[in-house]
Amino acid sequence: MTVPTIDTPYDIGPLHLRSRLVRAGTSETMAGERGHVTAQLIDLHRRLAYGGVGVSILGHAYVHPRGQYL
Protein backbone atom coordinates (compact mmCIF):
# COMPACT_ATOMS: atom_id res chain seq x y z
CA MET A 1 0.00 0.00 0.00
CA THR A 2 1.34 3.41 -0.97
CA VAL A 3 0.85 6.36 1.32
CA PRO A 4 -0.40 9.39 -0.64
CA THR A 5 1.74 12.52 -0.52
CA ILE A 6 0.50 16.07 -0.28
CA ASP A 7 0.90 16.57 -4.05
CA THR A 8 -1.20 13.50 -4.89
CA PRO A 9 -4.47 14.32 -6.75
CA TYR A 10 -7.65 13.74 -4.77
CA ASP A 11 -11.35 13.49 -5.60
CA ILE A 12 -14.15 14.78 -3.39
CA GLY A 13 -17.28 13.51 -5.10
CA PRO A 14 -17.31 15.07 -8.58
CA LEU A 15 -14.64 17.63 -7.63
CA HIS A 16 -11.11 16.73 -8.75
CA LEU A 17 -8.26 18.39 -6.84
CA ARG A 18 -4.77 18.39 -8.28
CA SER A 19 -3.22 18.11 -4.80
CA ARG A 20 -4.20 17.49 -1.19
CA LEU A 21 -2.80 20.84 -0.09
CA VAL A 22 -5.48 23.11 1.43
CA ARG A 23 -4.73 26.75 2.08
CA ALA A 24 -6.88 27.84 5.04
CA GLY A 25 -8.71 31.14 5.06
CA THR A 26 -6.80 33.90 6.85
CA SER A 27 -7.08 37.65 7.19
CA GLU A 28 -4.88 39.06 4.43
CA THR A 29 -6.52 42.52 4.72
CA MET A 30 -6.36 42.80 0.92
CA ALA A 31 -10.04 43.62 0.32
CA GLY A 32 -11.01 47.07 -0.86
CA GLU A 33 -12.42 49.75 1.43
CA ARG A 34 -15.97 48.43 0.95
CA GLY A 35 -15.04 44.75 1.19
CA HIS A 36 -14.72 44.17 -2.55
CA VAL A 37 -12.22 41.82 -4.16
CA THR A 38 -9.09 43.60 -5.34
CA ALA A 39 -6.48 42.77 -7.97
CA GLN A 40 -4.02 42.14 -5.12
CA LEU A 41 -6.32 39.47 -3.60
CA ILE A 42 -6.89 37.84 -6.99
CA ASP A 43 -3.14 37.77 -7.58
CA LEU A 44 -2.53 36.08 -4.21
CA HIS A 45 -4.98 33.25 -4.97
CA ARG A 46 -3.68 32.95 -8.54
CA ARG A 47 -0.12 32.48 -7.23
CA LEU A 48 -1.33 29.87 -4.74
CA ALA A 49 -3.09 27.96 -7.53
CA TYR A 50 -0.05 28.08 -9.82
CA GLY A 51 2.06 26.93 -6.89
CA GLY A 52 0.04 23.72 -6.58
CA VAL A 53 -2.56 24.39 -3.88
CA GLY A 54 -5.52 22.05 -4.36
CA VAL A 55 -8.04 24.19 -2.45
CA SER A 56 -7.66 27.85 -1.51
CA ILE A 57 -10.24 29.16 0.95
CA LEU A 58 -10.91 32.87 0.76
CA GLY A 59 -10.02 34.68 3.97
CA HIS A 60 -11.88 37.38 5.85
CA ALA A 61 -14.39 39.34 3.77
CA TYR A 62 -17.44 41.33 4.75
CA VAL A 63 -20.74 42.51 3.31
CA HIS A 64 -21.57 45.10 5.99
CA PRO A 65 -19.24 47.78 7.39
CA ARG A 66 -19.58 46.30 10.91
CA GLY A 67 -17.82 43.19 9.64
CA GLN A 68 -14.72 45.09 8.53
CA TYR A 69 -11.51 43.92 10.15
CA LEU A 70 -8.96 46.66 10.65
Image (tube, rainbow, N blue to C red):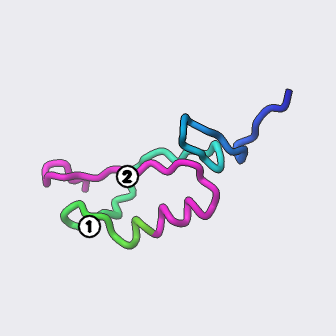
Kindly indicate whether the residue at mark 1 contacts the one at mark 2 (C-beta within 8 angstroms).
no
Point 53% across, 48% down: residue = 55
Image disc number at residue 60: none
As drawn, is 40 to the left or to the right of 4?
Answer: left
Mark 2 vs mark 1: in front: 1
Q: In this orientation, which residue lies closer to the viewer: 49 or 24?
A: 49
Point 37% across, 52% down: residue = 27
Point 70% across, 43% down: residue = 6
Magenta stretch bounds: 43-70
Looking at the rendered structure, the secondary structure element under dot 2 is loop
Residue indicated by mark 2: 27
Q: Residue furthest front?
A: 14
Looking at the rendered structure, the secondary structure element under dot 1 is loop
Magenta highlight on residue 66: yes
> Label 2 amino acid?
Ser
Q: Position of residue 12 (x, y in %)?
A: 56, 36
Q: Position of residue 5 (x, y in %)?
A: 75, 40
10 Å crowding of disc 1: few (<14), some (14-19), many (20+): few
Image disc number at residue 32: 1
